[in-house]
Image (tube, rainbow, N blue to C red):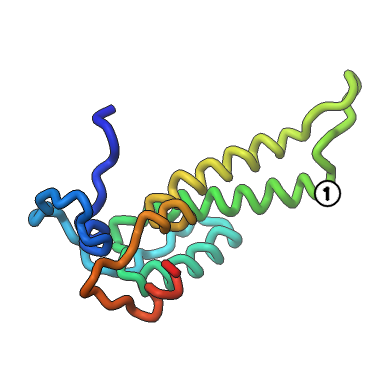
């Protein structure tokens, strides 16, 4: 590990570059564009894909190169939805010949939540990751930015 992950230049500009460190003027900035939805996504994952691509594009933080990360997020979402449905039907504790056991779908749900938090923070989809973003002076928020970032 080399320490903290670097903050993208766009976020540094939004926060007013509090560390006053030199900005990376050569940082790649792919054009804002909705990537094609992968065909292998389940119906639940596609619904989440459509919801998120609209929001992230409006904020100007989604590019075609983000396709794999967004697909992973949506697959984790679909996995969580499926696991929670199974838990709801059968309960958190199951009866086995050896006695009560924890429902294996709880493990699936917990892992999906971990993945959602990890990938979601990369896109600013968690409350903590959003709390680290604030508009610097002289930068007027768009309506979508104001709604998303509060």
Residue at image location 16% in from the left, 56% down from the top: 28
Q: Position of residue 6 (x, y in %)?
A: 24, 44
Q: Nearer the viewer, residue 12 or 86?
A: 12
Q: Is residue 21 rendered to the left or right of residue 126? A: left
Residue 109, above or below 13: above
Q: How many marks?
A: 1
The residue positioned 29% from the left and 63% from the top of the image is 63
| Most foreground residue, 56 or 89 | 56
Q: Is residue 42 above or below residue 110?
A: below
Q: Position of residue 146 (x, y in %)?
A: 40, 74
Left or right: where 79 falls relative to 127: right
Q: Measured along the vertical axis of the image, is residue 48 above or below residue 8?
A: below
Q: Report the residue at 13% width, 49% height from top.
A: 21
In this picture, residue 29 sits left or right of residue 122? left
Horizontal side of 1 relative to 150 (left or right) equals left
Residue ID for mark 1: 89
Percent coordinates x, y for residue 103 in the rendering: 77, 34
Q: Secondary structure at mark 1?
A: helix
Relative image position of residue 50 (x, y in whole percent): 49, 69
Q: Residues within 10 Å of mark 1 (few under 14, many from 20)?
A: few
Q: Is residue 105 above or below residue 8?
A: above
Indicate the quadrant containing the C terminus: top left, top right, bottom left or bottom right. bottom left
Give the quarter of the figure containing the N terminus.
Answer: top left
Front one among 118 and 105: 118
Residue placed at 45% from the left, 74% from the top? 147
Furthest toward the bottom, the residue is: 143
Q: Nearer the viewer, residue 141 or 50?
A: 141
């Amino acid at each position: 590990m080399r320490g903290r992950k670097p903050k993208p230049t766009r976020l540094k500009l939004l926060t007013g570059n509090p560390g006053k460190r030199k900005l990376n003027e050569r940082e790649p900035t792919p054009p804002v564009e909705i990537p094609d939805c992968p065909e292998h996504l389940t119906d639940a994952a596609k619904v989440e894909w459509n919801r998120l691509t609209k929001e992230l594009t409006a904020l100007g933080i989604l590019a075609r190169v983000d396709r794999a990360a967004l697909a992973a997020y949506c697959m984790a979402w679909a996995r969580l939805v499926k696991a929670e449905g199974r838990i709801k039907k059968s309960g958190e504790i199951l009866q086995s010949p050896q006695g009560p056991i924890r429902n294996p779908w709880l493990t699936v749900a917990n892992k999906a939540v971990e993945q959602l938090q990890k990938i979601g923070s990369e896109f600013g989809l968690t409350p903590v990751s959003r709390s680290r973003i604030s508009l610097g002076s002289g930068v007027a928020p768009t309506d979508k930015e104001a709604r998303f970032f509060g």
